[in-house]
Amino acid sequence: MVDAFFVGVAILTIGAAILALESKELIYGAIALAISMLGIAGFFLLLDSPFVAMFQITVYVGAVAVLVIFTVMLVRTQDLFTVKDDKGRKLGGIILMLLIMGGIGAIFLVSGINNPMFGKPDSKPVEIVEIGKSMLTYYSPALIVLALTLAGAVIGALALARREGLLKENESAN
Amino acid sequence: MNQLIDFVFVSVILVSIGIYGLVVKRNAVRLIFSIEIIANAANLNLIAFSRYIHNVEGQVFALFSIAIAAAEVAVALGIIIIAYRLYKQIDVEEFRSLKG
């Protein structure tokens, strides 16, 4: 028994995910990916987790989508259309997708998750205060390591993308 | 009222779409899209279980997972840009040599 909002968000999320992979132009794919992430944020709102939903919108729709769109704009667009999908591999991929979907779906259908006990959520949702307490007490080492990882990754990505001399080195090597 | 299994089914469908993209696509940016779709399906599962069994850790781990995914995208796009400079294309089947 699902409500109309759930069905709408599910169609938006899954349709945008398919469009992200199958759209002709890569830039439309990037925008479709952002819409799909927005749909996931809608699911988070539906699950009474507004804080994670806002984080999702900030990071994915705000940062990741813009990063991907800028990369697509930096890479020359003509080269992107020369990549053609192999027909046989595409068929194999679709069969694999349906197998995984049916297999894992069947496992979940017969598993205990389908139990009516899980039918209705706990009466009161998790509070934001609890998330903050848990992050700053028990998981504070993980938070610090995460901050260092993020800083390292961003600095590494900048250093990687800014190596000016690399092109000349490669040309002289050839 | 939505049940837990509905969210899990949406997550399973998203994971299968992501695996399809990883198997079929040769464009490096589309592979990143696939990885992002799979990571988001995992986050959806974490939040759904956290809601239905009333557990704070699910949301905390989802926040960590979103942050890690953002870092991963930054590094992956840097690698794609440098690979494009070297090979003049972003077809992953052409990235054959590790020399750089």
Image (cartoon, coloured by chain):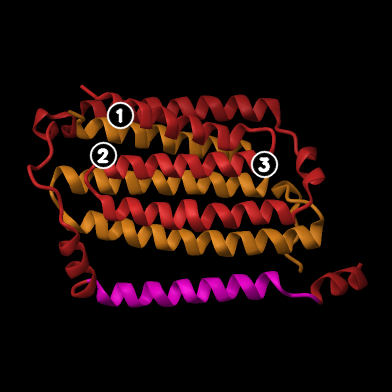
Q: What is the secondary structure assignment of the residue under circle 1?
A: helix
User: Which of the two marks, 3 or 2, is nearer to us in this view?
Assistant: 2
Distance (Cα) linking label 1 and label 3 = 29 Å
Disc 1 and disc 2: Cα gap in Å?
9 Å
Horizontal and vertical percent for residue A91? 61, 24
Residue at numbered disc 1? A5
Residue pictured at 62% horizontal, 59% vertical: B77
For chain B, the rendered hue is orange
Q: Residue flagged by tag 2: what amino acid is it? A: Leu
Report if residue A152 lies within the magenta region: yes
Give yes or no for contact between labels 1 and 2 (Cβ–Cβ under 8 Å).
yes
Q: Could you confirm whether marks 1 and 3 are on the same chain?
A: yes
Q: Is residue B70 above or below residue A84?
A: below
Q: Which residues are magenta?
A: A139-164
Residue A19: in magenta span: no
Q: Quadrant of residue B30?
A: top right
Q: Name the residue tied to disc 3.
A: A26
Q: Residue at x 33, y 59 (%)?
A: B63
For badge 3, the amino acid type reads: Leu
Residue A10 falls left or right of residue B99: left
Question: Of the residues shown, which amino acid type is indicated by label 1?
Answer: Phe
Residue at label 2?
Answer: A46
Query: Going 58% across and 27% down the picture, which residue do you hit?
Result: A92
